[in-house]
Amino acid sequence: MHNKVVYRSAKTLSQIGCATLRFNFRGVGKSDGSYDEGRGEADDFRAAIDWMTRQYPDLEVWAGGFSFGAWVALTVGAAESSVSLLLGIAPPTHYDLQDFRASTKPKFLIHGEADELIPVQDMWRLYGELEEPKELVVIDGADHLFDGKVSEVCDAIADLLGDFET
């Protein structure tokens, strides 16, 4: 939750008018529980979606995340009818993303050209398999943590979503 990509992305989304929620998955930081290989984390994400829809019943819900959190957000968000848009920053392409691939919801991806964990070629392959509508921004020279490039991630979010209407 205190990762610079997550923090600055949430701040950018807030600046463009989105209500945002950052939270730790079970077992991270001071959260109860322990890592559950994505199953429990998906439950955590669904609980967050439920909470947001109760807090902001008149707003659209967008699902987004970074790295493992992107995989959870894209997977859960693709399946949840209350979610209207999917945003993934450096999602792990080697995880099961079948529901995301088949989703017809708007999909926005941001990836580092020099990502040492998820090669950009794998991201391009995933992108090619996605249903429309979709957009991919590749940040030149950025590694997985976007060291020295977080402002470019924020610029991409603002450019992609600043005036987006679902």
Image (cartoon, helix red, strand yellow):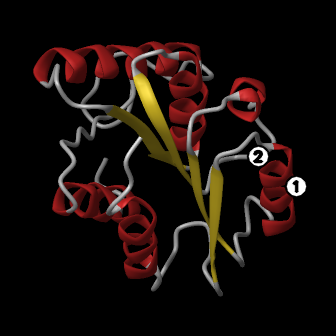
Q: How many marks?
A: 2
Residue at (75, 59) in percent of width and height: 118
Assess disc 1: are there few (<14), some (14-19) or many (≥20) residues with their C-alpha within 10 Å of its C-alpha: few
Q: Which tag is nearer the camera, tag 1 or tag 2?
A: 1
Vertical placement of residue 14 versus 73, above or below:
below
Q: Nearer the viewer, residue 65 or 28?
A: 65
Mark 1 or mark 2: which comes first in sequence?
2
- Residue type (three-letter) at the residue carrying disc 2: Thr
- Residue type (three-letter) at the residue carrying disc 1: Arg
Q: Position of residue 19 (x, y in %)?
A: 18, 42
Is there a contact, CB below 8 Å, between mark 1 and mark 2?
yes
Q: Nearer the viewer, residue 8 or 27?
A: 8
Assess disc 2: are there few (<14), some (14-19) or many (≥20) residues with their C-alpha within 10 Å of its C-alpha: some
Badge 1 is on which residue?
A: 125
User: Which of the numbered marks, if any, corresponds to residue 93?
Assistant: 2
As drawn, the residue found furthest toward the left would be 55
Vertical placement of residue 7 versus 142, above or below:
above
Q: Is residue 55 left or right of residue 147?
A: left
Residue at (55, 31) in percent of width and height: 72
Name the image quarter holding residue 112: bottom right
Q: Position of residue 20 (x, y in %)?
A: 22, 43
Vertical placement of residue 26 versus 18, above or below:
above
Name the image quarter holding residue 125: bottom right
Q: Position of residue 78 (x, y in %)?
A: 58, 25
Q: Is residue 96 left or right of residue 11?
A: right
As drawn, the residue found furthest toward the front would be 165
Residue at (58, 14) in percent of width and height: 39
Residue at (63, 59) in percent of width and height: 135
Q: Position of residue 104 (x, y in %)?
A: 65, 32
Circle 2: element type: loop
